[in-house]
Image: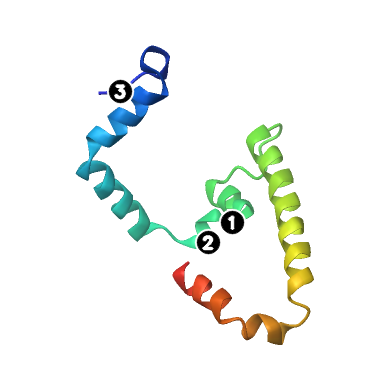
Amino acid sequence: AVVSTQSTGAAGVMSALMAAGDKLWHLADVFMKQFRIDQLIFPEDIKKRGVEDIPGYHFRDDGMAWWKNLRQYCQEFLELHYTSDELVSGDTELLSFLDEL
């Protein structure tokens, strides 16, 4: 059953999710087995959906602005900590993280 947040509040939504129990874990498991990190690349997702040329498509336009800013922030942050390619390739924790993805 669908639970309305208007009638039950956030606690009711959480109760409904918890009541789903094993079914919810199964759905999460199926999702994670199909998930690939490259699915999070916003410009590629827009191309895959075929919506890159729709005029006035605000989801795409706003998302691309967020993508550009987030990418720039991440790049600048990483450049503060990794001043060479050798530092990146020598960071075992970073490489382990990438393997997890």
The residue type indicated by label 3 comes to Val
- Seen at 63% across and 84% down, the residue is 89
CA gap between label 2 and label 1 equals 5 Å
Q: How is the image coloured?
A: rainbow
Left or right: where 71 falls relative to 33? right
- Seen at 71% across and 39% down, the residue is 61
Q: Residues within 10 Å of mark 3 (few under 14, many from 20)?
A: few
Whether label 2 touches label 1, CB < 8 Å: yes
Q: Is residue 25 above or below residue 32?
A: above
- Quarter of the image with the N terminus in it: top left
Left or right: where 57 falls relative to 96? right
Judging depth in this view, the residue of 12 and 31 nearest the camera is 12
CA gap between label 1 and label 3 equals 31 Å
Residue at image mark 1: 41
Kindly state the secondary structure of the residue where label 1 is placed.
Answer: loop
Nearest to N terminus: mark 1 or mark 3: 3
- Seen at 71% across and 60% down, the residue is 74
Q: Quadrant of residue 3?
A: top left
Res 38 label: 2
Kindly state the secondary structure of the residue where label 2 is placed.
Answer: helix
Residue at image mark 3: 2
CA gap between label 2 and label 3 equals 32 Å
Judging depth in this view, the residue of 59 and 11 nearest the camera is 11
Please name which of the two marks, 1 or 3, marks the residue nearer to the observer: 3
